[in-house]
Amino acid sequence: MKAMILAAGRGERMRPLTDHTPKPLLRAAGKPLIEYTLENLAAAGFCQIVINIAHLGAQIKDYCGSGARWGLSIAYSDEGETALETAGGIAKALPLLGDAPFLAVNADIVCDFPLRELREVTPDLAHLVMIDNPPHHPEGDFALAGSGLLAAHGETKLTFSGIGVYRPELFEGVPAAPLKLRPVLDRAIRNQRIGGQKHSGLWLDIGTPDRLAEFGNLIACSNGATSV
């Protein structure tokens, strides 16, 4: 199974840090965020990686290179200066991802979910890892039914973690143009074709300078051990 790191975002909430450095290269405990992700993908057995890039993307490409130093093979989907959002970015990268299900991970999250388990998932159209709603997203995204299917409405909604396995068929007809993932998921959820599971462990969205500092402190307290 190939894996895609979604790394093309502008990082507006991180400005001015991201004015001259792409968000995935911001450092926590001396290491760029994307390097933690690459290390954990390698540890989970993912060898072929696609990274989408846009704002200051050449810096990401220069830093990560071929991926050989992590035992990986990295290909790049260059979206130009303006990112295509998640759905548009994945649609553009499909020629690099192939015909089989693939993992996609946001470049700005920290989560101790065991990624190796997702290599055994055989989704209908997608399988999403869900978490309890964080303080900055209290309304949640989708409900998780006892059947393992996601629903737009339910008694208790959970938040999408930014980790999911997708079949390329989910993106049939999706243009390689700016488009968020939510409308694509909503359509498939209405047709009961998206599954999921809940993760109750560590999860951080490194979306602000404060949360970047929090991640750095977490690493310091854990003696450098962390997850994607």
Image: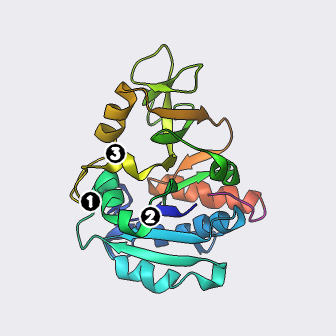
- Say which of marks 2 and 1 sits in front: 2
Q: Are marks 2 and 1 in contact (CB under 8 Å)?
A: no
- Highlighted range, magenta: 223-228
Identity of the amino acid at label 1? Leu
Q: Is residue 179 shown above or below 146?
A: below
The Cα–Cα distance between marks 3 and 2, rounded to whole angstroms, is 19 Å
Percent of width and height locating residue 47:
62, 71
Residue under pointer 2 = 98
- The part of the image, by quadrant, that contains residue 177 is bottom left
Residue under pointer 3 = 181
Residue under pointer 1 = 84
Q: Is residue 64 shown above or below 34?
A: below
Q: Left or right of 51: which side holds 181?
A: left
Q: Left or right of 51: which side holds 40?
A: right
- Crowdedness near tag 1: few (<14), some (14–19) or many (≥20) residues, C-alpha within 10 Å: many
Percent of width and height locating residue 178:
22, 55
